[in-house]
Amino acid sequence: MFGSAKGQIQLYLDPLIAIALIVLFLGFIYLQFGGATRSIQGQVVEFKEELDNEEFLLGLLKSPILDKDSKIFAGFSLADLIAMSVHRTEFEADVDAVVYNSIKRKTDAEWRFIVNAEGYTKGYQYYPSAAFRDPELVKGLRSVVSETQIPSLDGKEIKVSLVLIKKK
Amino acid sequence: MNKKAVMVITLMVVGVVIAFIAFSVVNLSDDLAGKSVSYIGAKELTIARLQMRSQEDLLFVDQSARLAAYKSVFNLADLGGFRASSPCGVYDNYNLWNNKTDKCYPTKTELGEALVNDFRFNFNQYRSLLQKRNLLASYTYFYKDGDIIGVADTNFIYDKPVKDFILSVNPSFREKIDFDFDVFNGLQEFIVSIDKCPELQQASISQCVQTRMTQFTMKYTNINMTYDDCKGTDVKIPDDFDTKGVLKFCAIVQDKKYPLYNADLKVAGLNHPLIRFAVTI
């Protein structure tokens, strides 16, 4: 004899509940620690990109700009030029051109970096740099990948961003 | 199923349920308390980001020092190498390098001191931007071998994002001025050379000064000198020169241009620092 009907159900139910709970518990553990592993991996990858971009941006800002067509800028750093270019001057086009041509970086066939500077000009209006006034470039705007502040000649702050742009 | 097996399974079920509840309570209580789950290595990443942030701030300091130094070079040239008024007096807003009794050429030491003094004022304006970001540091300034040196007496401290961790960064700097003070020595040489002009006929003084100036610019080909208003080389010696006996000069170093912001016009541009001074003949 195999006992009563209640005993029969109990016989099958207990192991099933136990197995279900164990599976649930293991799943929960996996999601917690597996998720953590993925999260930290994601953060490391993200940080590495962030660090590369930041180093690139800071290195770029410190580098002296040597432009064969505009010897007047030789010896000045990109940050110097940006500090000048956010103010509208008679040579703004030249400065913007030098900045733009000096910093565009061919990363691969699809993408390139440019630097954008935002500051306040006379009249205190928001004024993006020349590269951003080009509608063709703005269309392909992907994302700001790094940013920092530099001082301007008139004692204000300029936000400088490294932007990844998709080529058309 | 025997009783022993039932007991083992029951104990296992109870154990798993307790573990599950305990695990859930711990996690849910963090979520309910609004605490973000901190993963292994998150603090280390935050520290590395702080390091990057400190590098950005150091760039800001270096850039501020450079822009402040540019402004100081313009101010120093405008005051003829002095901190303020010349000990020999001022003529028509031009500092005098001599008068009837004394000679007051700025020495290299005085030039360095005047530059540092003006730099301190200009750099403090930029420091206020850092202070707004709670980056406090006081500086001692020096001028040495053509460089302005700022030695920070206190460090930038980054201590908020990670508990029990402090990042301390020294924001000292050394900025190359790239403006040769020997220009002032050359100009002094020119002034000594025109000292003898009054010994000639009064009518010839103008011609004598002009000749000396030509000789000077032939020797110092990178320096451009003019009389009076700095606007050109053909400016005549002013009519009242005979009565007042004072000449105003302007000099520029042709290959030296620096960024300057004109607060009145609200424009920035690259300009030559104008060395302005007056001489009694």
Image (cartoon, rainbow, N blue to C red):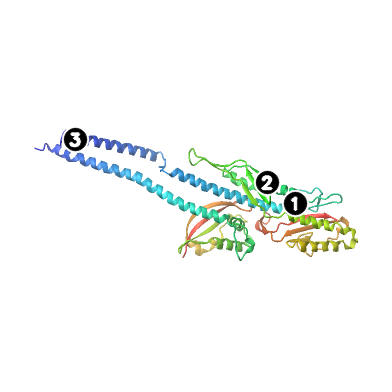
SS category of the residue bearing label 1: loop
**Residue labelled with disc 2:** B142
- Measure the alpha-carbon separation of dots 1 and 3: 100 Å
Question: Chain letter of disc 2?
Answer: B
Mark found first going from the N terminus, 1 or 3: 3
Q: Is residue A144 visible?
A: yes
Q: Residue furthest left?
A: A1
Residue in front for this viewpoint, A60 or A31: A60
Residue B36, label in figure = none
| Mark 2 neighbour class, 10 Å CA radius: few under 14, some 14 to 19, many 20 or more | some
Q: Position of residue B203 (x, y in %)?
A: 89, 63
Mark found first going from the N terminus, 1 or 2: 1
Same chain for the residues at labels 2 and 3, yes or no? yes
- Give the residue displayed 17% in from the left and 33% down from the top: B3
Contact? badges 1 and 2 (CB < 8 Å):
no
Q: Position of residue B96 (x, y in %)?
A: 80, 52
Q: Is residue A90 visible?
A: no
Mark 1 or 2, closer to the camera = 2
Q: What is the three-letter code of the residue carrying label 2?
A: Phe
Q: Position of residue B243 (x, y in %)?
A: 88, 57
- Give the residue displayed 51% in from the left and 63% down from the top: A135
Residue in front for this viewpoint, A58 or B124: A58
**Residue labelled with disc 3:** B6
Mark 2 or 3, closer to the camera = 2
